[in-house]
Image (tube, coloured by chain):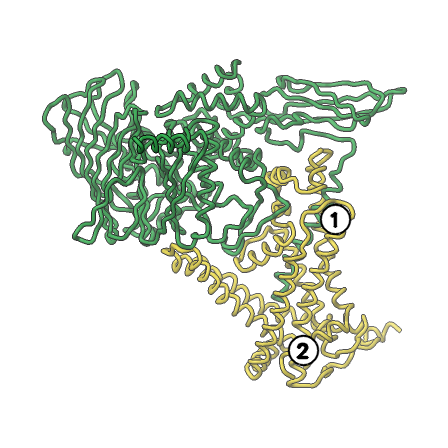
Amino acid sequence: MNCLSALRDGVRRVNRAPSIVIGVWVLTLLVSLPLAVALRGMLEQHLGRSLAADTAASGVNSDWMQEFADQATGLGVTFKPTIIGFGAVLDNLSAFLDNTTRPVAIVGAAAAYIVLWIFVAGGIIDRYARDRATRTHGFFASSGVFFFRFLRLAAVQWVVYAILFGLVHPWLFDRLYPEITRDMTVERTAFLVRVVFYLAFGLPVAAATMVFDYAKVRAVVEDRRSMLGALTSSVRFIQHNAGSATLLFAANFTAFALVVALYAIVAPGAGRSGTMMWIGFALSQLYILARLWVKLTFWASETALFQSRLAHAGYVARPVATWPESPAADAIS
Amino acid sequence: MRSVLALLVVALVVGPGAAAQPGVTGTLNPPQSPRNANYTITARLDPAARTITGTAVITWRNLTTKPAADLQFHLYWNAWKNTQSTFMRERAFGSTGLGPAVDDGQRAKEDWGRIDLTSIAVSSAGAASTDLTSSKRHIAPDDDNAGDETVLSVPLPRVVEAGATATITVAWEAHVPRTFDRTGAIGNFFFIAQWFPKLGVLQDEGWNCHQFHAGTEFFSDYGVYDVSLTVPAGWPVGATGVQRERRENPDGTTTHRYYQEDVHDFAWTTSPDYIERTARFEHSTLPAVDMRLLLQPEHADQADRHFDATRTTLKYYGEWYGAYPYGHITIIDPAFQSAAGGMEYPTLFTAGTRWLAPAGVTTPEGVTIHEAGHQFWYGIVGNNEFEHAWMDEGLNTFSTARAVAHAYDPSYLAMRYFGGFIPWVFRDVVISRETDGNRLAGYRRNARSDAQSTPTFRYFPTSGGSITYNKTALWLNTLERWLGWPTVQRIMATFFERWKFRHPRPEDFFDTASEVAGRDLTGFFDQVHRSSNVFDYGVQSLASAREGDRYRTNVIVRRYGEALFPVDVTVTFRSGERVTEHWDGVERWKLYTYERPAQALSAEVDPDRVLLLDADYTNNSKTLEPKGPAAAAKWSLKWMVWLQDCLLSWAALV
């Protein structure tokens, strides 16, 4: 199976399990909703019974937004015009590449979200690896089995990403980039240098992500308990299949870029409250769904590629979890 | 005879505007200013060594009623000699968390600047020239900082009597810094300002010659500048005035001679990278102006935007306040990272743009209009920027916002991403003249930081701009909304006419305003200028309940801030009836009671938003049909999408 076949197969596997896409979307919604409710409370309190709310509801009341921002704390400080439409995506991509610090509340939400992803990762990859329905209990049994293994993997990931974002990024962008561009008097040249730096930073991040992805895939497909073993076997796999693995990653990244580009065209603006608000929100959620679909396609296609090279489609070493699957459960009856 | 007739025909066709244009030679007839500080300068730039050597012959006349016993010079570049200067100490506030961090400790030795006066000789009243080099000494009139060398005092062997003239010959050597405060060099881009020993302004109270401060600019007398600059051959030069002569030298350099009358400063720039464009401003009633633009090659496609913005300035400022008299103007587009953008000098200014400058966003237009506008407020009306910076920056910020609103409406918010390189335009967010153009948000944050009447150089360094630029623009626009534009336009035009080519003080503006408005505005200026009090009026409560067959409505309005201003209070009823009350705004609160057949719907203080200085406008109204929940729902959903996208960005690493 070449990388394009793996991508096609991955797409097919994701599309055959829409409940997973819906599930991770619900997960995203559940993490973001409480914070959105909290922000809504802040906004409502600040607006009170003011007529400023009329223009804020029907469009953008820029002056009110600035007044709010001037007194905001915590979550509230992130409420800026950049959240409107495609600006939100640019803001986040830019913050990711520029390693911009976010408020504690956002970092906390992101940490919780990542832990939840670590929890469901085993179930998701297991479902895609088997390429057939594993049912709810099978999904969560796999999730539970791999959660602690993936937490151990996450510890390694944390160290690697901490080095990349905590040491490499500052060295590249806060030290080397200013040194190199210090005497540049042409903005275009400085921007080109920055693009090169983004690549220099982005490629190791992508490489690390690819290694960790295949480590998870191998852990699930081969029922590996040692995460260090999964990592070394992931590296071996990528070494032996460098072309396909890299091209597949690039193809998935291209899909991500296409989704983002499409959203740049259709992203709803500020809009009005009422029906238009919900239409805009629905459109935005389609974008979120598409982003999630792309993320899942990364895993599914990588699973397909791995299985095509070292196993076979649908091969998973660990048996499907069946109820009752534990002595403790047997003891209940 | 035929040629005379032809000339007459041409003159009639061209019309009065063009006929009124002065010859573009740098001369103004008759003289517009006292011309009491005239400089003939010869200077040479060595770009490799980054040095300037110069000599100047200064002809100075004592305009005061008292004799002058000494001379005081600004040596601005010594502010960048080391970290001990007052400028650097004030700038270092940024490094202590009080403002943007400045890491001057990382500067290499060659990045610092300095100016050394190597000789000075003075002659007056026909006496022979006396060498005073050995008697010069640095003084620090503002803070006694012994480490500051930005003011030089030279005692005179004989006083210069009132009305008498002295001829001063100076020579100096200077090292061009890596750009500090819009001055210096980066790569082969040189912007040279505040670069020669410049006399302070002698007033009856003594010399007004402040040290160079981080937050303030300059002050000097008007005169004639005749400046010969030698730079490498092939390097275009932009400078104050008009190029009268250009001489190629055998050593591979070119000497450019620039000349200008009735200006109070001289700045110049050179770089081999500049590309040059020219255009012309023409108007039915205003004199024509030749525009010269020295542009960075990567901005070649933005030349017309620079010219259009400059035309906008010359047109509106000219129509509102008075004509631009010089007949020419030079626009400089500074190099990337030069930090030389957005600064004004007589007949020359630096604009500032970006490689990606989307349409619908006023970059470069906003900064171009502002700096071109300084030709009027700073260049022609020459206030003391050390002490009353609001008189040029504030008047000009107000005028900029007004001109932008006239010429570039609508304009939109743009934010920049990916290291600030990539702009994104938010077409939902229309820039408002009143709040965005006058910079309300910045004022709101620093409203109490200083009374505007405090000498500007004593403002808290990191918030002074809000009081200088923003507050003035806001109170001028408030005045416009209160008295009407025709009145405010006449105030400013009268002030401009009376004080052009002179040095006005704040009272001169206030007196003009009261006189032209036909009412005593002292109370208003006490509030906005002589105090740091904050304006904040609001509706405390609105209740409207049925009593029998009628509704009893109680509206309590409150003055939450300390500052006073008369405001309207409008109550709207469900029947559509609107009742407007005039409240003097003096008491802390006021109750309005109505009995009407219809229930009240809303109450507003200052519904027309006359008082733009109100620090909290959200509390200015209350309604019985609040849309707060709907607005909060809409915006929290928008924010949630941003959050979800943010979460997904980081989840990519899982």
Query: Viewer-proximal residue, B478 or B225?
Result: B225
Residue found 20% across the figure and 49% down from its top: B248
Which of the pair B276/B480 is nearer the observer? B276
Q: CA distance from mark 1 to mark 2?
A: 39 Å
| Residue wearing tag 1 | A277
What secondary structure is marked by label 2?
helix
> Which quarter of the rendered picture does the C terminus of chain A lie within?
bottom right
- For the residue marked with disc 2, what is the amino acid? Thr
Q: Residue type at mark 1? A: Met
Q: Is B64 left, or right, of B580 in this rendering?
A: left
Farthest left residue? B128
Chain seen in green: B
* Residue beneath disc 2: A303
Give residue A85's position: percent from left, percent from top: 65, 52
**Chain letter of the residue beneath label 2 in the structure image:** A
Identify the residue at image location x=26%, y=50%.
Answer: B50
Does the rendering let one see residue B255? yes
Between residues B228 and A55, which one lies in front from this camera angle?
B228
| Chain identifier of the yellow chain | A
Observer-nearest of B227 and B145 = B227
User: Residue A70, image x and y in percent?
Assistant: 59, 39
Give above or below for B649 relative to B627. Answer: below
